[in-house]
Amino acid sequence: MSLWAIDSPKIELRPNTSESELQTLIRAVYKQVLGNAHLLESERLASIESQLRDRKINVREFVKRVAKSELYQSLFFNSSSQYRFIELNFKHLLGRPPADQAEISEHVRIYNEQGYDAEIESYIDSDEYQQNFGENIVPYVRSTTSQIGIKNVSFNRTFTLVRGVASSDRDRKAKLISDIGSNLPTSIKAPVAGSSVSSTNKRFLIKVVKGVANVRSRLGNLEYLVNYNQLSEQVQNIHRMGGKITSITEVA
């Protein structure tokens, strides 16, 4: 069993995608973009589903229209603070947490000057979205392994935003406002009670590719076995030493 936040498998719309595969893809979009919210059959966006089925729009446009829908606004915009809304937009549309206060401030500016639609488009029409998901891959959580171009602290912050497979994003309280606003590190915290993962008495295997900034040194594969209460500190140590985390899994 893996740690509660894991990178999701890539789901892509292809020319030969069957109807059952299309339904799996549509459910994956709803799950990612709507923050694991329970969706009634009557709440599904049948019109844009049909356009996707007929290939009149691609997955990126489908994601954009879901995020611009009244359903998305009712879940995450109308009843949440602006900071929480932006925090969730990063998670839902780019698969990562905000990197720093500058990113938050830029999206506050976009919304205040250009409005709701422009705020949503600023994620989905970005180079980052295109490079990671292109036109037909469903967005997914992608910061649970170290990545080029993403700050190491995003690894820990992802676990703060992703609270387990049974959780949803209907909580109105911003999760990262203090750490990002104060430029502080974020600790890995266990899921809340009621999540599908219990909080502690667990051990985790961290797999790392280690490289040192020295042309004579070689890359090496390292493994660390730690208790849950040592996990956050060990992750920070790995990042300080220049290691790249490739996976974290729970072990018996």
Image (cartoon, helix red, strand yellow):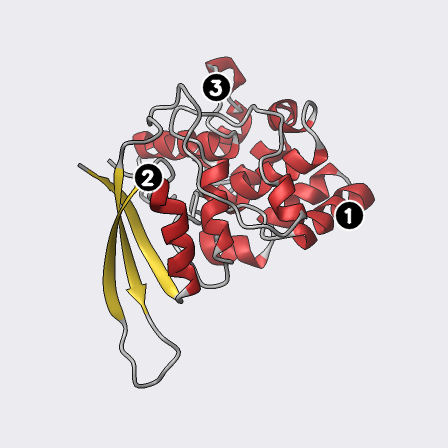
| Residue 39 numbered tag | 3
Which disc, if any, is residue 228? 2
Q: Secondary structure at mark 3?
A: loop
Query: Where residue 203 sits: x, y (%)?
Result: 25, 40
User: Given the image, on which type of amino acid does mark 3 rest?
Assistant: Leu
Residue 109: which numbered mark, if any? Answer: 1
Q: Position of residue 97 (x, y in %)?
A: 54, 45
Numbered badge on residue 55: none
Q: Is residue 239 left or right of residue 99?
A: left
Across and down, in percent, residue 5 comes to 38, 39
Q: Residues within 10 Å of mark 2 (few under 14, many from 20)?
A: some
Q: Nearer the viewer, mark 2 or mark 1?
A: 2
Placement of the C terminus among the 4 image quadrants: top left
For discs 2 and 3, the disc positioned in front in the rendered view: 2
Q: CA distance from mark 1 to mark 3?
A: 31 Å
Judged from the image, the secondary structure of the residue bearing numbered disc 1 is: helix
